[in-house]
Image (cartoon, rainbow, N blue to C red):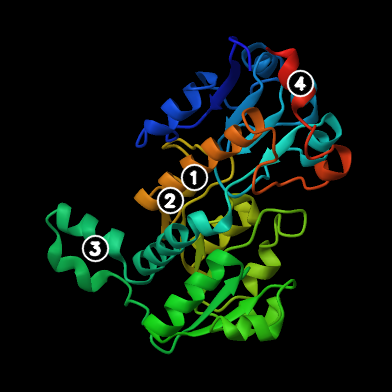
């Protein structure tokens, strides 16, 4: 590679390179780095102005990379998601334009997100946040006014989506808490689910039987708004919902109605539609809600692994002329030769 380095933008990420600055130094060996913030609701022209000259993007959960946005990024060769989900990226457009989309493998965040889900589950089931607030307010004696906690031992817990994270949650719930775990996932067999300490059921049966439901499915056209008034009404009275995947899984108005009416016992979430949100968000004024600021992957081991993945992906593309290890748009393989996919573009930037 010539003396002129390629440009890599770190977009809307508050974590990459902060806890592990060595990841920045590794990239700076062959790239010029720039941190870029794209405001919520920004038009495509803002992307084009700020990112028009970059060859690589390290992308957070926001903003959304639409086809219109991508068309105005002519030098972009790789968009690397600093996370597992790619629902904010138009994968088909990336394939059409020859842009490789890489992502973090599920094993990197698996333990961290599973622990977060269980933490939220415990907090909602045992009134931990409410109890803490009482003590801070000097109202210890009011603990008897809180709803009684839900015991996990023997309780039926439903898991929606039993991939890497869901299986970890299932193992801990079954072996650690002695809960009765059931799971809905149309893409996983009953045999595999049984091997992961759960029983395969239909979505309808899961809603009817579960005292707690925890969500571990990706956001797709199938899962978007899969929880609306009909599904929420079908759940057990006072059931608890835990969400560490995406806020768009719910119809937010229906969810708020179910909470305010007392139908649901609680909602604990690490994700919100349209995040980041402000203090005025309607969900925060709703009864029995716990919201954390997307902390699922924010742990020592997870952030290190996510950062290492970004460094490895960029190194493979711009130094080794290879594809990243985990690709979100595998159709790109059909469009380009593995050994020549990046060579022409690399030479043009030397």
Looking at the image, residue 282 sits to the left or right of residue 178; the answer is right
Q: Which mark's residue is nearer the viewer, 1 or 3? A: 1
Residue 306's x, y, as percent?
49, 45
Give the position of the C terminus as an image quadrant: top right
Give the mark nearer the N terminus: 1 vs 3: 3
| Residue nearest the observer in this picture, 73 or 225 | 73
Q: Which mark is residue 302?
A: 2
Q: Which mark's residue is nearer the viewer, 4 or 3? A: 4
Q: Which mark is residue 131?
A: 3
How many labels sit on residues? 4
Residue 163's x, y, as percent?
61, 67
Q: Which mark's residue is nearer the viewer, 4 or 1? A: 4
| Residue nearest the observer in this picture, 1 or 180 | 1
Residue 297's x, y, as percent?
45, 50
Give the mark nearer the N terminus: 4 vs 1: 1
The reply to whether dot 2 and dot 1 touch (C-beta < 8 Å) is: yes
Give the mark nearer the N terminus: 4 vs 2: 2
Residue at the disc numbered 1: 306
Look at 66% across and 75% down and name the residue there.
184
Residue 326's x, y, as percent?
65, 49
The reply to whether dot 4 and dot 1 touch (C-beta < 8 Å) is: no
Establish if 74 lies above or below 203: above
């Amino acid at each position: 590679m010539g003396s002129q380095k390629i440009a890599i933008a770190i977009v809307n990420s508050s974590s990459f390179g902060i806890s592990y600055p060595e990841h920045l130094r590794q990239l700076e060996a062959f790239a010029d780095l720039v941190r870029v913030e794209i405001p919520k609701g920004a038009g495509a022209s803002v992307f084009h102005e700020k990112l028009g000259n970059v060859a690589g993007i390290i992308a957070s959960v926001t903003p959304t990379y639409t086809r219109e946005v991508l068309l105005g990024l002519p030098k972009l060769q790789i968009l690397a998601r600093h996370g597992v989900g790619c629902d904010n990226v138009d994968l088909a457009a990336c394939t059409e334009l020859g842009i490789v989309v890489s992502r973090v493998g599920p094993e990197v965040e698996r333990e961290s997100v599973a622990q977060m889900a269980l933490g939220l589950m415990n907090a909602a089931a045992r009134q931990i946040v409410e109890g803490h607030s009482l003590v801070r307010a000097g109202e210890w004696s009011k603990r008897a006014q809180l709803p009684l906690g839900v015991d996990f031992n023997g309780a039926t817990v439903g898991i929606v989506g039993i991939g890497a994270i869901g299986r970890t949650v299932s193992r801990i719930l079954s072996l650690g808490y002695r809960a009765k775990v059931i799971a809905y996932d149309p893409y996983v067999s009953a045999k595999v689910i049984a091997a992961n300490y759960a029983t395969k059921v239909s979505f309808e049966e899961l809603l009817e039987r579960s005292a707690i439901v925890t969500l571990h499915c990706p956001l797709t056209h199938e899962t978007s708004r899969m929880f609306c008034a009909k599904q929420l009404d079908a759940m057990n009275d006072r059931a608890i919902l835990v969400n560490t995947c995406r806020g768009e899984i719910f119809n937010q108005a229906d969810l708020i109605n179910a909470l305010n009416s007392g139908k649901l016992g609680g909602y604990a979430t690490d994700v919100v539609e349209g995040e980041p949100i402000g203090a005025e968000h309607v969900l925060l004024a709703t009864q029995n809600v716990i919201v954390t600021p997307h902390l699922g992957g924010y742990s020592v081991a997870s952030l290190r692994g996510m950062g290492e993945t970004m460094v490895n992906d960029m190194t493979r593309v711009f130094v080794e002329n290879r594809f990243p290890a985990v690709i979100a748009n595998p159709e790109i393989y059909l469009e380009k030769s593995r050994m020549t996919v990046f060579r022409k573009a690399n030479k043009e930037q030397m």
